[in-house]
Image: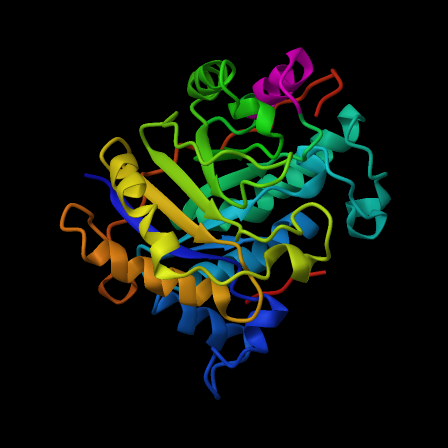
Amino acid sequence: MGEIRVGTCSWTDRALVGSGWYPVGRRDAEGRLRHYAERFPVVEVDASYYALPGERNSRLWAERTPDGFVFDVKAFSLLTGHPTRQAVMPHGLPAEHRDPAVLDAVWDRFTAGIEPLREAGRLGSVLFQFPPWFRPGPRAEAFLGECAERTEGWPLAVEFRHPSWWEPGRGEATQALLTRYGMAAVAVDMTQTLPSSVPPVTPVTSPRLSVVRFHGRSTAWGTGSKEDRFRYAYDEEELAEWVPRVRRLAERTEQVHVLFNNCCGDAAVRAAEAMTRLLDDAPAARLPRARSAPDAPPTPGPRPTPARSSSSSSSRRAAG
């Protein structure tokens, strides 16, 4: 039975910081991360989507967390084909993901930025969350192949935002594609009332890792503001629906990361606390406790050298 790690998608979100969840005296960058890591064994770094991660920050994160704590790092927006602000691009490079030279430079910076986490054994995964217009087809498959080459040896997780990847008749091909590249499929919980809703399927495509991300069930998904999209408080009945699914994933993988992205106020940490309690009641699940220094994640391979390719492919930055 694999380990089940429960946490949230960010520990620095402004709404969480303003909610009062962090106690007085632990609201600076170092205090927030230490407080969080005493309560959960995993967290997702979402700041790396908005700006390239820096080696100094990664080193500080490793120093401020206990042995066994891991970070799931979200890939920089340019690397997944999302619009990217020119202001966050290094060395005045254009924000153009179709330019091979730009991609090479950005990959180099991203790789260097997360290297301290890899060296410390704290890199849980790198999350590639693709945009809603990233649909199945030869170009998308080629893009995934290039990502696999550039990230060889990394623990990688992939979340598709277009529902056609997992629709009946297509899901098996998607599962086979991710399995070929050793990429962990990300299962999602979200409202199922919209045309853009991704079904809550739970395929296993890597023996090392499975990831479940809870986005909340707001019907404003894809249309409203950030607050509208993620303003949702899970009740225990909704969370309990996922307990047997998460258990089944843990039977087939070394680790399962369960991450809450309903980041309005303290809703995500409260949901993570509730899910941890529910899973604690499930005897089959091994839940590492942050205070007791759980086992380290699967040992990553050597640092890959970002692959050079001549083909076309493909805010909140803080130390805590």
Locate residue 223 relative to residue 37 in the image: left or right: right
- Name the quarter where the N terminus is drawn: top left
Q: Quadrant of residue 18?
A: bottom right
- Above or below residue 30? Residue 219 is above
Q: Quadrant of residue 78?
A: top right
Residue 288, can we see it? Answer: no
> In percent of the image, x 42 and y 69: which residue is there?
36
Locate residue 138 relative to residue 88 in the image: left or right: left
Report x, y in % for residue 105: 72, 35
> In percent of the image, x 56 and y 61: which residue is there?
263
- Name the quarter where the C terminus is drawn: bottom right
Residue lying furthest top in this view? 138
> In percent of the image, x 82 and y 39: which residue is there?
95
- Above or below residue 19? Residue 189 is above
Work out whether residue 188 or residue 310 is closer to the camera in this orientation and state it: 188
> In percent of the image, x 54 and y 54: which residue is there?
45
